[in-house]
Image (cartoon, helix red, strand yellow):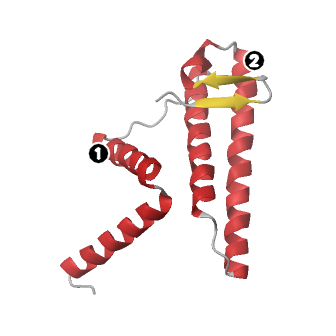
Amino acid sequence: MNPVFNSKDLGRVLSLSEVEDLDTCDQKLLYEELIEAVTSIDSTIKEISDLEKRSGIRTDSDWLHRAKKKRRICLEFAARLNAALGGMEPPKISYEDAYKKHLREILTEELGPKAIERIEAEAAELARADVGRD
């Protein structure tokens, strides 16, 4: 699956595989746009979380899932651009971590965030019972 990003600054939709083909000026412009997008997403998530704490109204888990997915895609693009611009290489992750990350993403897309939350809660409860913390 090749993620895409709709760049307002460049006025076009780019796939992750295209970022290295951009000229340096466009790469820098896109990198700044991505960092701004991540900052904006983080700020919005924090605001929504604070509102949830104050009001007691639960955050829409589907919205939160979409926001985090957009953030993850922006970070993927930024890491690729950082490497292309001569920055540090994106950190290498272990096979197990990569597997867990992709498994969670696929399960969340297939089952939805609410189902994953229920499954995780059940697994945590069973694990506590296994180790005698219940």
Secondary structure under badge 2? helix
Secondary structure under badge 1? helix
Q: Residue at x 70, y 16 (%)?
A: 24
Which circle, 1 or 2, is nearer the viewer? 1
Q: Determine contact: label 1, label 2, CB under 8 Å.
A: no
Up/down of 114 relative to 83, above or below: below
Residue 77 as seen in the image, left or right of residue 38: left
The three-letter code of the residue at mark 1 reads: Glu
Q: Residue at x 49, y 33 (%)?
A: 90
10 Å neighbourhood of mark 1: few (<14), some, or many (≥20)? few
Residue closest to the far bottom: 134
Which residue is denoted by mark 1 in the rendering?
96
10 Å neighbourhood of mark 2: few (<14), some, or many (≥20)? few
Up/down of 43 relative to 31, above or below: below
Q: Residue at x 60, y 50 (%)?
A: 66
The three-letter code of the residue at mark 2 reads: Cys
Q: Residue at x 35, y 47 (%)?
A: 103
Residue 38 sits in which quadrant? top right
User: Which quadrant does the C terminus fall into?
Assistant: bottom left
Up/down of 130 relative to 108, above or below: below
Which residue is denoted by mark 2 in the rendering?
25
Q: Of residues 124 and 78, which is closer to you in this image?
A: 124
Up/down of 59 relative to 103, above or below: below
Could you tell me how many numbered marks the image carries? 2
**Rendered location of residue 50, percent (x, y):** 70, 72
Residue 75 as seen in the image, left or right of residue 103: right
Q: Of residues 20 and 66, which is closer to you in this image?
A: 66
Q: Point out the tag, 1 or 2, that comes first from the N-terminus.
A: 2
**Rendered location of residue 17, percent (x, y):** 54, 20
The Cα–Cα distance between marks 1 and 2, rounded to whole angstroms, is: 37 Å
Specify the label residue 61 is tagged with: none
Residue 15 sits in which quadrant? top right
